[in-house]
Amino acid sequence: MRFLLSAVALACALPLCADEPATHPGYRVLAQDRGRVAIVAQDGKIEWEVACKHNSHDIALLPNGNLLLHTTPVTVVEMTPKKEVVWKYEAKPKEGYKGRVEVHAFQRLADGNTMVAESGNRRIVEVDKDGKIVKEVALTVKKPDPHRDTRMVRKLESGNYLVCHEGDGCVREYDATGKVVWEYALDLGGRPASNGHGPEGHGTSVYGALRLKNGNTVISGGNNNRVLEVDPKGKIVWSIDQKELPGITLAWVTTLHALPNGNLIVGNCHAGPDNPQLFEVTREKKVVWKFSDFKTFGNSLATAHVLDLKGATR
């Protein structure tokens, strides 16, 4: 009986195709959409939730069990499971700038500081436990826009920063002084540009990028409707096109997790209820896990942290 119940719960959490392995362990998912942040268990039940009306573009579960959340366009907080805010940073216009500021990316660093990317201010800051800015790195932005200067940003093991510039359609790597040491500009992949957030929209509004251990960079293309892996010279060495995976159409491609076994977990935002919000794909382009929960979340699930992944890069 215990085995039967476990099998039923797993089936609910893993809407797999018939030819996909039924032994996949499934995942817990932390994400934000529809006015809430929630952790969804493998059986589809909500383990934890808190109100959050801001459409977040980054999210994290910290090693101490607290959550790093994006609660307003300019605010990042650390919240305990008891929903107590124990740390907060609010981005404000820098000296000499009077325009709007938005935050789209943040990361808790190994030294305990928090990296925050500030669109509008066109900078990365590192903030200490007291909310004081201890480091600032200016960004190169060719098409300034407080909503589109940046999307996903990650500090690399080298100390450099990998920055997705949505408006520029470009991923740039900066050293600690703010010098651009590498960049990759997205193209349209042979398709005409078109408007829209769903599968019909197509452009170069890049969302995410991760540096792999082999030195290549994997990119979630936003409305480019593709996932790309490029080598240090900018050559595409692996990709997923919009309709290459059976039963999945890519729309605004967002979340990225690189797993130690080479698989990728990919976020598929604005793709509609006929498509999963997240999926895991092998290097042979076989989908081995899908997440579709349009009851807890909706069609604007832009960021997610898939939990319990040892050794993953995100």
Image (tube, grey):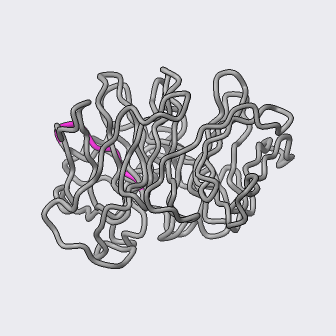
Q: Which picture quadrant has residue 254?
A: bottom left
Q: Please name whichever residue, 148 or 175, is drawn nearer the observer in this view of the structure.
A: 175
Q: Position of residue 12 (x, y in %)?
A: 45, 55
Q: Which residue reaches farthest left?
A: 190
Magenta-span inclusion, residue 13: no
Instruction: Tell me: residue 179, above or below residue 195.
Output: above
Q: Is residue 211 above or below residue 79?
A: above
In the picture, measured across the screen, residue 216 lies left or right of residue 142, that is left
Give the farthest residue toward the front. Answer: 96
Which residue is located at x 58 percent, y 42 percent? Answer: 138
> What is the span of residues highlighted in magenta in the rendered image?
278-284
Residue sitting at x 70%, y 68%: 53
Q: Pick whichever, 169 or 213, lies toward us.
A: 169
Q: How many numbered discs? A: 0
Q: Which residue is rendered at x = 68% and y = 67% of the image?
A: 99
| Image spot of residue 8 (x, y percent) | 44, 50
Is 281 a magenta residue? yes
Above or below for 227 versus 200: above
- Asked if residue 212 lies left or right of residue 89, the reply is left
Looking at the image, residue 311 lies above or below residue 68: above
**Residue 283 percent location from the top left of the image:** 21, 36
Q: Measured from the top left, where is residue 54 in percent x and y?
A: 67, 65
